Image (tube, grey):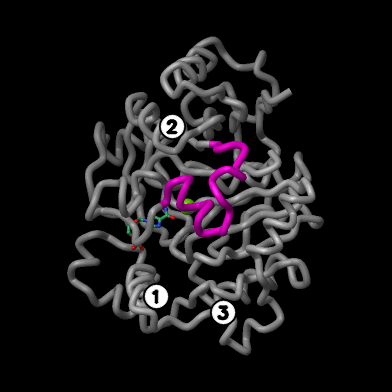
Amino acid sequence: MPCTVIVGAFWGDEGKGKIISYLALKDNLDFCVRTGSVNAAHTVWKDGKKYALHMVPAAFLNEKSRLLIAAGANVHVAKLLEEVSLTQVNGRIGVDQNASIIEEKHSIQDKTSAFNKGIGTTGWGVGPALEERVRRTAKLAKNLPELKQFVTDSVQEINDGLDAGKKVLLEGTQGFMLSLYHGTYPYVTGRDTGASAIASEAGVGPTRVDEVLIVYKSFITRVGAGPLPGEISKEEAQTKGWFETAAGTGRDRRSAPFDFDLAKKTAKINGATQAAVTKLDCMFPKCLSARRYDDLPAEAREFIKEVEKQAGVPVVLIGTGPDALDIIDLRD
Ligand code: IMP
Ligand code: MG
């Protein structure tokens, strides 16, 4: 803090939503800025209630946080309105004037493209919407009457906030291996998902970022097509307790064991200064709901130490269960 970028290390679904919701509650974030688009779903659990958020920032749990949608983001209007009412954030959520709009036609183009089917896109239309933005023909938030009440200059708000020493969190979406530039092209999403790109989408210069918190899950998952080194079968994943379905599309997630070499590489390219490890309880069931490091079994502590050694950054947060507060916080 005060300015932290949250970036996913692998192919998305590392548990960024959970880490962000914890930080919102614990650190009293002043601003949380959502980048990317509706294809990404961030899961937040609080008091037994589950939210799979496609548009609203995961920090909504803290009623004092100002929630913003970045200038570089792509807004799905219907989903945004639905989630604003679900999370009751009316009055404290803003959409940047220059955010572009993802429309039904983009989703149709995405779903009917044989090529995109081969990639296994989410079908929300993010690729086609970004193509339109590049052609300079996209609709922007400032031109839509439905968004009038939300439209703001978020870039000014964020930078003024940083000048005043406010706590700002930039919420990345997907994982680094789905980056258009650095991932497993062509099996990637339509934009760069790295830490620098997250700051760029939000309109924050690189020298204003204080921490890059990279989020690792204790095992790796991927939805859609493309390489996944060390992939195991669905049956094996079920036996290990690693089998997941996608929060957004409901598709089966493929899975593989944690990859230390990849962890090292993604920490370096993103300039990570800190790491979080989520779902430790899925690897080591005795960790479930642990809130103190000393309560972890020896093998779980060894795993965390190995992550730190390979990634070269301290593991500061460890997820031990689904609730926003199922966390071991090693920062103080
Ligand atoms: P698109 O982003 O919908 O174009 O899909 C491109 C690839 O990124 C596909 O393999 C998707 O499954 C994957 N993808 C997109 N968004 C997410 C996400 O939020 N989590 C995990 N995978 C994603
Ligand atoms: Mg997700």
Residue 256 position (above or below residue 11): above
In this view, the residue farthest toward the bottom is 145
Please give left or right for residue 80 compared with residue 329 in the image: left
Q: Measure the C-alpha gap from mark 3 to mark 1.
A: 12 Å
Please report the residue visible at 33 percent of the width from the left and 39 percent of the height from the top. 255
Q: Is residue 164 left or right of residue 281?
A: right
Per the rendering, the mark at residue 267 is 2
State the CA–CA distance, disc 3 to disc 2: 34 Å
The segment highlighted magenta reads 193-213
Q: Amino acid at mark 2?
A: Ala
**Badge 2 element:** helix
Find out whether residue 196 is within the magenta segment. yes
The crowd level at tag 2 (other Cα within 10 Å; few <14, some 14-19, many 20+) is many
Instruction: Please identify the quadrant where the N terminus is shown.
Output: top right
> In the picture shown, does residue 122 fall above or below 273?
below
Residue 304 appears at what percent x and percent y? 51, 19
Circle 1 crowding by C-alpha within 10 Å: few under 14, some 14–19, many from 20: some
Q: Earlier in the sequence, mark 3 or mark 2?
A: 3
Q: Residue at x 53, y 63 (%)?
A: 54
* Residue furthest top in the image: 298
* Location of mark 3 (residue): 141
Q: Which residue was labeled with disc 1?
A: 133
Q: Which quadrant does the C terminus fall into? A: top right
Residue 183: horizontal and vertical position, in percent?
A: 30, 46
Please tell me which residue lies in front, 180 or 240.
180
